[in-house]
Amino acid sequence: PLPQAWALQIESAWQWAIFVGRSVLIAIAVWTLVSLLRRWLPQSLVKLIPWFGRSGLDQWKSDVLSQFAAGLQNSRPAADLLATLGRNSRSLSMRNACTFAGRRVENGTDVPAALWHAKLINRQEQSWLNAAAANGNLPSAVAQAAKDIDRRFLSRWRLRMAWVTPLVTVLVSLYTLVFAAYLIGVLSYLVGVCAQ
């Protein structure tokens, strides 16, 4: 028979392993659900989603700015374009951002400032668009800003893929190795006890 202390220790280790496994599965399930629902979340919450939050925002911003630039190149009013983009965007955060920027433009704010206040561009892009607007090149500058956002997204994605996949592989391997070593220890003890 197994000593009481060892039986309690084995039971405790099994409970710990089950707890860790279930916790990881729950975390992955919640992350997957939130990642799938990110279109319907506000921009402040989308940013918090690991791995897919910022990349989704960058893709949406790039799409919106590309469409906005195309409309500006066809001489459509900026406020109308932003209102249309706000109505037709597939994500809640871009609908809110475009509607907000459109209202600001209608109230007399210049386009780069409205885009910055709506968090569609950063401060550096705003200053660049201000200079382009002063020179009459706003449509091409907005198109270039969309390309820059897309390029930044792609470079960040490649960097993540370069280190995250090996890291996950190492972590899963370490967990498996530690668990296997523990099981071998328990089994060798049981074999020793049974052999006596």
Image: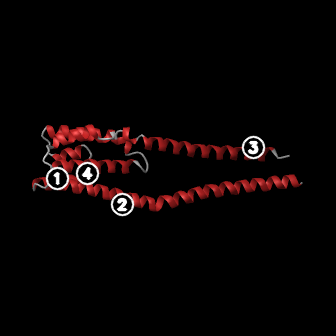
First along the sequence among labels 4 and 3: 3
Q: Which residue is mark 2?
A: 155
Q: How many angstroms separate mark 2 from mark 3 (CA)?
A: 51 Å
Classify the position of the C terminus by image quarter: bottom right
**Circle 1: is it few (<14), some (14-19), or many (20+) Cα within 10 Å?**
many
Secondary structure of the residue carrying tag 2 is: helix
Q: Amino acid at mark 1?
A: Pro
Whether tag 1 and tag 4 are in contact, CB under 8 A, the answer is: no
Residue drawn at (40%, 45%) of the image: 48
Q: Is residue 128 in sight in this rendering?
A: no
Location of residue 36 in the rendering, given as x and y in whole percent from the top left corner = 44, 42
Q: How many angstroms separate mark 1 from mark 2 (CA)?
A: 25 Å
Q: Which residue is mark 1?
A: 139
Secondary structure of the residue carrying tag 4 is: loop
In this picture, residue 175 sits left or right of residue 185: left
Q: Which residue is mark 3?
A: 8
**Circle 4: is it few (<14), some (14-19), or many (20+) Cα within 10 Å?**
some
